[in-house]
Structure formats: structure tokens, C-alpha cells
Image (cartoon, rainbow, N blue to C red):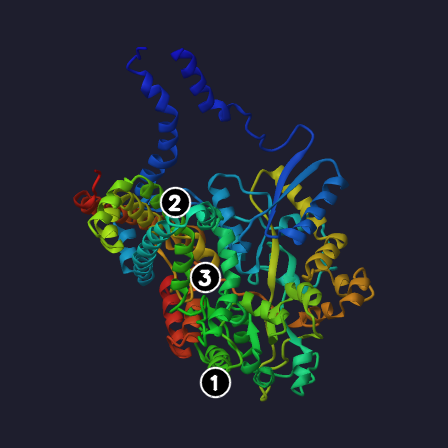
Amino acid sequence: MTYKRWEPYAYIAPVLVLFAVFFIFPFFYSLFISFNDWNILTGDKTFVGLKNYRTLFASKIFGLSIRNTLLYVFTQMPCSVILGFLYAVLIEKSGRAKVVYRLLFFIPVVISVSAASLSFLTIFNTMHGPLNAFLKLFGITGPNWLNSPKSALPAIIIIGVWQSFGYNVILYMSGLKQIDGQLYEAADLDGASALRKTISITLPLLSPVSFFVIVITTLSSFQVFATVQILTNGGPNNASTVWVFYIWREAFRYFETSTASSAATLLFVFMLAATFVLVRHFQKTVFYK
Amino acid sequence: MAAVSLLISGGLLFAGGNQEAPKEGSTPDKIEITFTHVFSGARGEVMKGIVDRFNASQDRIVVSQRDVPGWYGGLLEQLQTLAVGKQLPEVTIMSLSESTTMRSQLGAVSMQHYIDHDGYNLDPFIPRMLDLGRDAATGEQFALPFAVSTPLIFVNRDLLRAKGIDAPVQPETWAQIREWAKTVSDPAAGINGIGFQLDFDTWQFQILLDSFGGQMADVATRKVLFNKEAGQRVMDFWLGMMLKDGSFPNITGSEAADNFINGKLGIIVATTGNLRSFTENAQFDLGVLELPTWDDLERKNPRRIAGGGSNIFILPSTPEKQEAAWEFVKFALNEESMKAITEGMGYMTARKVMADPDGPMADYMAKYPDSLRAYDMIDDLVNWYNWPRQGARITQTLLDNIIAAFNEQKSGKEALDDAANATMQILGW
């Protein structure tokens, strides 16, 4: 069967058009808005150069949102990835119960963020929530989870890990299936311990999966929003205000769409840089064979 | 084959665009308008009922109603988005704290023209409630009160009685409330003294501020005033209960409401809108009290209560649709609609007859006698303070600083001074 040169492009055209309309155009328009003072209601736009960016960099709350986001990313991502790997290894060894465990760990992934967040409102209730009641059994006084600046962000991180690590379990489990069992048999013959087999066989051969999981989890954790909005509204006193929440609040609560666009542009640049760093690092450490 | 595939792909791409866009405006016979609000569930059914009855009462105008999630913040967000797309609804309700935003940013149409043109009689309305939608400077009635609330003091009489407190319907002073909270509080038994619903706006801060003789700001002199003596007294009051007495736990208003219903909180200062919920769910002897008459034992400052709840607004549209919107507004504010709002939602409504225990609400008031409590405070109603601009940011700034003081990140004075300085900067004063 022969194809005319334009045919492949014709078939991908619908997706490209949608991508252009819903991603490319909004991105460039947002970038354009970030250099303007835009009254969203009257439509008036005035070019202001870097003024919006200067306003951002002078804002303590924006700085706090970046700090909180980085804290979230560098805590939630490693926990989610490591737990995903550990549970995948454990579940692989669990025989016929594997199917049940896989389902149980994947349930948080498919529950909507809103439903999960509302449930956690009850769980984290300071006085009568089940979590503090459980801690009390061990003589531990649970923190004022959502109302204390020390524990609000950790509470959000806990939910983030809970909701995401199940997906990583599934990915690691499919990666583990790809590893040739004969490698482990050979290692057994050589007297390798379980730890040695993990370090020398499992981890290197799972490196492509780890690469994917780390990049995806990192990018997704940069965009945490719904949990913050529902549980803490960025509080108390901005202790859980993260980057995307800051953008949303500037745009939709304060009507400052220009500032929000600037913050969104900076987030894109930051995430692009983070992806670049991760890819460069993993190029050296990923084993595909 | 390729051509057929291409045709199918193209058809799929443009299929949605082939649907006829919803007709804007009217059919030849009917005018179609939209009414947006924030109520869902059982309360949403009340709104639907009002709309359905209006549509059935005449055949010229068709109203469709839409409840927008996220309470008034979500509604404001939605209205902003709709404004950009030139698809604002014709009628909406909005929090009393956003009246300035509705007028200056969303161009809400003043109702004074329609009131004058129609000869609409405002005499049956409670004057203080009409003030909530009136421009104090010009006297213009730009909106009308829809569902109004004040805070009430809800008490668990069983807990109070167990500690020897027989709470009167109207406590004398806030100092008295503090003493009750301290007495009722029993951390060993998991009982806290008092809760305030103050974590999502500054309504209750303003009520205490006004009652302590203060004010939020003076626009004429461009001065922020909430950090002066009266404001400090509010912070001292809250922080005293929280950090010294240990009777006011640092929890959200929602948690406080849950704990109160579960019998773990003795007193809660909450909106009238909670009356039905507390009445139906509390498994204890529920007491409903007015706010104290005076600030303290010296009785220097009488109570002032910022009205909460919502006004109903007409938004800019064609003259024909605005007229239709006005017809719906009149229906939504008639006795039958107001009865439905109070019975179904617990809010106060603006007609004098609604506060008459022998009027249309006689059966409801016989069943829920405490519903009169909020009406008894009407004479002390004042407007919820609207900042001249950037109201949402200023409110959040003040709230953040109050919460910082609750978490001992700052003293009460530092919190208010920081909030005041930030507010001056935001306003450019």
C-alpha cells in the first residue's frame, strides 16, 4: 500500500489542531499577557514590560509559594517513587494475592482528588478525626493538622503520596515482569543476597521505569492544586500556598490575570528546566539492556 | 480509501461545530434569562422551586437557574469568566461583602430605575435590610436584600447547665461569653468552650470590631483603622480565650460546627444559616442567643452587627432582558418566595411580615421559635464593609495575619499592624 506524502499529516491534523487550540495558543497568549496589564472585564491591555515579573519577585507570598512547592516536590516525589518500588517488589512476591493488592493500591489513583480531599478533611479533624484517635492509642498527641502552619503542608504531602504511589506500583510491577528470571537464578548460584540482587539486577534493569516514574511524578507534583484548595485554601497564613494555587488565586479571586500569567510562565520555565536536568542526569544512569 | 478516511476524520473534527449554537436571547414569544446562585442540595431545591413557580406564573419569560459550586468565591470566579465571554447571567445573588465588586467590576445595573419606573413599593421591607443594598452616599437602591443572616450564639444548654450556667436569651457582654466558655471548657473530657466561624472571611472580626467601637477604615481620610484600639481589643479577646483560657481551639469554622453538633463544643458563634442544621442534628438542648448587648461591663459600646448573606443583582444585558430580570427579582422577593427561603434555608428575608410571629411564618416560628432571634437584632444591623478595591486580597491579608496570631507566629498587635500596612500598600493610600 502506498501513501501520498500528505496523508500522515492529514490523520494527525485533528489532534494537532486540538493541541494548538488548547495548549499552544493559550501558552503564547498567557506569555503575551504576562507583559501587559490586562483588565479581563473591559479587555483593555497596556504593555508594561517586566513590571508583572518585578511585582512577583517582590511578593513574599509568591516566594513562599515557590518554597512550599519545592518542599512538596522534594518530599512527595521521593516518597511516592520509593514506596511504589517497595510495594511493587513485595506484591510480586505475594503469589495469588497479587491481584487483590494491585487493585487495593490502585484505588486511591482512580478516586477523584475532590472526593479524596473531602474524606481527608474528616480524617485530619484535630479533635475527633480517626488519625489523631489512632495516634492517641500510642500515647501520641496528633498535631492540629490543617490549622497549624507546621503540619498543613505535611498533611497535603501525605495525601499526595497516598494518591500517587499506587500508580507507581503498577508501573514498577510491569517493569519487574520484564526482568529475566534467569538473571536472579544465576545470582543465586553465585550466592548473592537479596540486597545484592536488588542493587545489581533489579534497580539497574528498572532504571527506564524509574526514569519515567521520577519525571512524571515530579512534573505532576509541581502542579498540586485541588488538595490545597479544598483542605486548606492555602492556609494557615499561606503555609500551604503552592505555586499553582497562587496562580489560581491571583487570577480568579483577586482578578490579577496579568500577575497570574507571569507566575504561570515562570512555572513553565521552572518545570522545563527541571525536566531538562532530570533527563540529562538519567541519560547517564538508565540501562536499556 | 484514503479519501474516505480523511472525510471521516474531518467529520469527527467538525461534528461538534455543526450543532446549532444555543440561541441567545429570545424565541419570538419568550424572553430567556439565567439566574445564578450558590445553593445546592436541599437549598438548591428552594431556588429551583422559586424559578419553577415564576415560570409557571406567566408565559412571557423563561428563567433557567444554575447553582455554582464554591460558594460566593466560586460564583464570583464564574461571573468573571462569563463576563469575559460576554455571557453574564441576567440575575444573580452575591455576598454582601462583594457589593462594590458587583457594581464597579461587573457593572451591576442599579435597581433604583426599575423601582421608580414601576412604582415598586418598598414600604413592606425592613429598612435596615434595604440599607444593605443601598448606596449610603447617594441613597440609591442598587440591589435588594435576598437572603440575609447575622451571627447568632448557639449553645449546648446541657453542657452549660452541667457547669451551673443558665444562659439567658440575650447575654449582656462579650466578657460574659468569655467566662461561660472558660467554665464549660473541659479538655480532659474532650470538651471545648467556644468556636467562631472566622477562618474564611472577616465578617465576625468586623462584628466584634464594630461592637467594640471601631471601624475598618475611613475612605475619606484614606486611613486603615482596624488596627487601632478596638481592633486590638478584638485580638486580645480571641487570643485571651485561645492562649490563656484554652477555651477557644484553633480549628476551622467547619470543624467547630461538627464538634458542636457532636456535643464536644459548648458555644459556637455562627451564621443564622446554620439554625436549621443545628436544630435538626443536635442531640442536646440547643439554645439560640442573640449577640451580647454591650462590649464589656463598662457598657461603652452597643452591639453592631454586619449583615451577612446576599443581595440580588441585575447584571447588564439588553433592555428587554433587564426588564425580564426585574420581573423575576420582584417574584423572588414576594412573600411566597421569602417564606420558602426562610423555611428551606434558615435565612432571614427582608419583608416586615416575615418577622411577624402571627404572619405567614407563624407555623414555622411556632416550630422553630429561635428563628425570631436574628430578627430581634435587626435594629443593630450595619453594612458589611466593602473595601473600595482589591477587597478579596485585603480580606485574605487580614485573615492571614489573624491566623498567624492564633498560631503564635505574631502578637495580636503585630498581626493587625502588618495587615494594616499591607492594606495601605494594596490601596495605594
Q: Which residue was labeled with disc 2?
A: A170
Q: Eyeballing the image, is B91 above or below B124?
A: above
**Label located before the other in sequence (2 or 3):** 2
Name the chain under label 3.
Answer: A
The residue that label 1 is drawn on is B244
Local SS, label 2: helix
Camera-near label (2 vs 1) is 2
Where B44 falls versus B15 (above or below)?
below
Residue B382 percent across, percent down from the top left:
59, 68
* Mark 2 and mark 1: Cα distance apart in space: 52 Å
Three-letter residue code for mark 2: Ile
Q: Which residue is mark 3?
A: A232
Residue B144, horizontal then vertical, whole percent: 64, 55
Q: Is residue B275 above or below residue B233?
A: above
Nearer to us of marks 2 and 3 is: 2
Amino acid at circle 3 = Thr
